[in-house]
Amino acid sequence: MTRPNLCRKMFDLYARETPPLIESVQKAVSENSAYDLRLYAHSLKGSSNSLGALRVGKLGAHLEGIGKAKTTEGAAQLLPDLDKEFQSFLQAFRQAGFK
């Protein structure tokens, strides 16, 4: 498999798997589940950082820290930025030729 094909497959997987993960983070916040917030934010952080979506990864780390503190307080304010940064990453990657 060539590197461009590998990058495309990784991007496609990230683009497909991340929206449900973000939804799980949002659900954890709305249900006030610090445990689930920590769990899903940790996954989001890892997958985002692995692909170079560092702003999404940073928000994931912040959300994970909130969950580790056994609260969801302050997490809801980060959710709009999380979605915005994810969409910005997708747009930038697609503009680079990975559609």
Image (tube, helix red, strand yellow):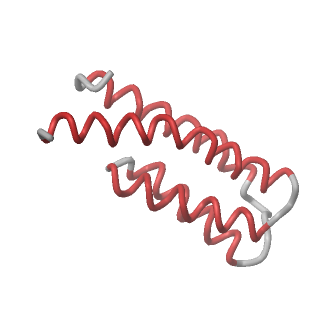
Q: Which residue corresponds to the image point at 45% horizontal and 61% vertical from the top-left?
A: 46
Left or right of 60: which side holds 71? right
Residue 41 sits above or below residue 19 on the image: below
Q: Residue furthest right?
A: 31
Q: Nearer the viewer, residue 81 or 45?
A: 45
Q: What quarter of the picture does the N terminus occupy?
A: top left
Residue 86, position in %: x, y? Answer: 49, 38
Residue 71 coordinates in the image, percent (x, y): 79, 71
In percent of the image, x 38 and y 57: which residue is there? 49
Q: Nearer the viewer, residue 64 or 98?
A: 98
Kindly identify the residue that appears in the image at 43 percent across and 50 percent down.
55
Residue 59's x, y, as percent?
Answer: 54, 55
Report which quarter residue 93 is drawn in: top left
Instruction: Indicate whether 11 appears above or below 91.
Output: below
- Residue displayed at 77% across by 76% down: 70
Query: Residue extending furthest bottom?
Result: 69
Name the residue furthest front: 1
Horizontally, residue 22 falls left or right of residue 13, namely right
Q: Taking 26 as reference, is 71 above or below it?
A: below
In this rendering, position of residue 97 left or right of residue 39: left
- Please tell me whether residue 23 is drawn above or below residue 31 in the rendered image: above
The mark total stands at: 0
Q: Position of residue 85 (x, y in %)?
A: 49, 39
Residue furthest to the left: 2
Q: Quadrant of the C terminus?
A: top left
